[in-house]
Image: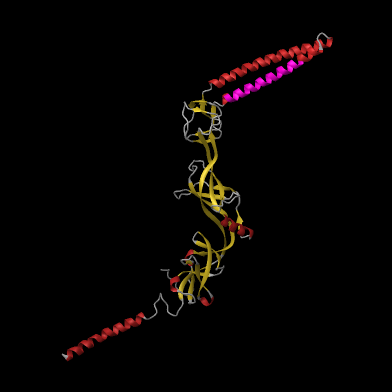
Amino acid sequence: MRASRMSRKASLLPGLGVLACLIAACGAKGPGFPQGGAAPVTVVTLKTATVTLTRELPGRTSAFLVADVRPQANGIVKARLFNEGAAVKAGQTLYQLDDSAYRAQYDSSVAALAKAEATLVSARLAAARSAELVKIEAVSTQDNENAVATLGQAGADAASARAAVESSRVNLAYTRITSPITGRIGKSFVTPGALVVANQAGTLATVQQLDPIYVEVGQSSAEWLRLRRDIDAGRLTAGGSGTRVSIVLEDGSRFSHEGSLQFADVTVDPTTGSFVVRAVVPNPEGRLLPGMFVTAVIDEGNLKNVVLAPQQGITHDPKGGATALVVGAEDKAELRNVTASRTIGDQWLVESGLKAGDRVIVEGLQKVRPGAPVQAVERGATASGAAPAPPAK
């Protein structure tokens, strides 16, 4: 019995030796996790650049021109002469009113004018005869003066009659209600047989010019002050009026035509702290309709001598603070507090904390800590005599 126990113990000794070797091996340095050595990392060396700043602002479209169609004469709508939603031209007849009363008034004024002009001819001849007779004292001076006065009165009557004809002609023309502008007309709010009144509050229809079309967005006054500060400091070259504007539609697609900035309002809305910026956008196909929500991508200008850092190298804490690990003196990792204002493509625009020439760690961040030595390899290249850094996990 005792001999069997000793034989079992002897058989366990080789296994214990193997286990001891495995434990020792686990304590050795692994290729991916160096102990006391320099951790391999990938870095990007920062440089200064000139970038074009863009700003995406939500906005809404509005018609370039809007004209409400209202009657300027009283009457019954006799006919509607357009198709709802169709394109119309300035001066095109949209509605025809019953014009019988206005036409009768026009004919009466024409007849009155003819009578006044006939009277004027008679008065002119009488005045001419009187002027000859008074020379030979065939008529008295008073009679001659009366003839001249009658001629003047006849001329005034004729002028008044001509004005009455013009007035009645205008009123007759008002029975043809025309489009004030060229554009697209909406729905009609009246039908044939309806009674309309001159200068009524309700519109008959609305015509809108949609090519080009306005896009109005709101920009915060705080951001405008920041832009003005950069412009005054010479860092930013502003685009101003005529700046290019790209439009992104509600479905995320980009509109095929670029617009231009027309003007910025001079009053800040006290409730929102923003002011209106208006762009003019070509709309030949009529895809943009008034009231649509769009996103305007506005070129704010060119920012000079700025530092851009890769997004992989900038981390944010829960409070929004940004930090970056850079390779500092003696090839050791150094933690920097960074102020990053906005993203430009896949990079951050750095306001402070980093400068040109800094080597920002973008891969291998989980293997290093501040103050630890690192073996830096520039992204896109391999270090002399060293293997490329492994990708970050």
Q: Picture coordinates of residue 204 (x, y %)?
A: 50, 32
Residue interval drawn in magenta? 148-171
> Is 148 located above or below residue 60 in the figure?
above
Image point (24%, 85%), residue name = 12
Magenta residue check for 160:
yes
Q: Quadrant of the N terminus?
A: bottom left
- Return the residue nearer the eye: 91 or 239: 91
Q: Picture coordinates of residue 282 (x, y %)?
A: 53, 43
- Return the residue nearer the eye: 363 or 31: 363
View extreme (top): residue: 138
View extreme (left): residue: 1
Image point (65%, 23%), residue name = 163
Write down the quadrant of residue 356 in the picture.
Answer: bottom right
Regarding residue 303, the answer to whether it shows in the image is: yes
- Return the residue nearer the eye: 171 or 247: 171
Image point (47%, 34%), residue name = 187
Look at the magenta stretch and give its main secondary structure: helix
Q: Picture coordinates of residue 16 (x, y %)?
A: 28, 84
State how the image is colored: secondary structure
Regarding residue 364, the answer to whether it shows in the image is: no
> Is 76 located above or below residue 19 in the figure?
above
Image point (30%, 82%), residue name = 19
Left-right relation of 311 to 9: right
> Is 364 located above or below residue 285 in the figure?
below
Q: Picture coordinates of residue 259 (x, y %)?
A: 55, 47
Left-right relation of 368 to 7: right
Magenta residue check for 65:
no
Q: Quadrant of the C terminus?
A: bottom left
View extreme (front): residue: 142
